[in-house]
Image: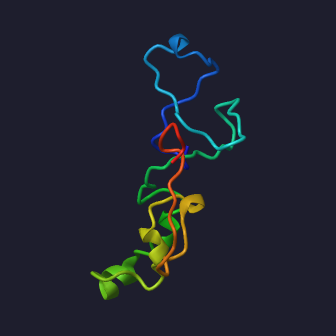
Amino acid sequence: YKYNPVGTGWSRARNQRFIPGLGLPNTQSVGEEIRSPFGDYKPMSFGPMGRGWPGRIEYGGTYDDNWTKNIFPFLPPDFDERYFQMAPADQQIDHPRGGEEVVLVNLTPEGR
């Protein structure tokens, strides 16, 4: 599955003891129940997206013969700095301006 190349599988069984030795995904999109291994599901994670994953690689630019002969070792002209953003799109923020308040919630049983 190209959007989750490090995923570990799917099983119809909800009880882990029925799936000996098989690791399964720990997260899924909120409100989206995974019912089949063939669905078009959105994986959810707080981990970084790999350099070659969809959502990131399309910003990497074009590395063709022209780049090899005329531009290397520099980045290609169509390189987009969004390539350096490793967070999934739904977890990205605009560049901080300074003075923003940051509140972390639900990190303890009390909520803050």
Identity of the residue furthest to the left in this view:
73
Where is residue 79 shown, x and y percent of the image? 45, 79
Could you tell me residue 90's position as x and y percent? Answer: 60, 59
Does 98 appear above or below 2? below
Residue beneath the point at 55% across and 49% down: 3
Extreme residue toward the front, this view: 110
Instruction: Name the one closer to the observer, 33 or 60.
Output: 33
Instruction: Tally the marks.
Output: 0
Position of the N terminus, as image quadrant, is: top right
Is the residue 85 above or below the residue 36 in the image? below
Classify residue 81 by image quadrant: bottom left
Q: Residue at x 32, y 79 (%)?
A: 68
Query: How is the protein colored in the picture?
Result: rainbow
Residue furthest to the top:
18
Foreground pick, 23 / 105: 105
Report the front residue among 107 and 16: 107
Residue 14 sits in quarter: top right
Q: Residue at x 57, y 62 (%)?
A: 89
* Coordinates of residue 20 in the picture (x, y in percent): 46, 13
Q: Residue at x 40, y 82 (%)?
A: 76
Q: Residue 31 vs residue 72: left or right?
A: right
- Percent position of residue 75, x then y: 36, 81
Instruction: Tell me: 76 left or right of 88.
Output: left
As drawn, 85 above or below 17: below
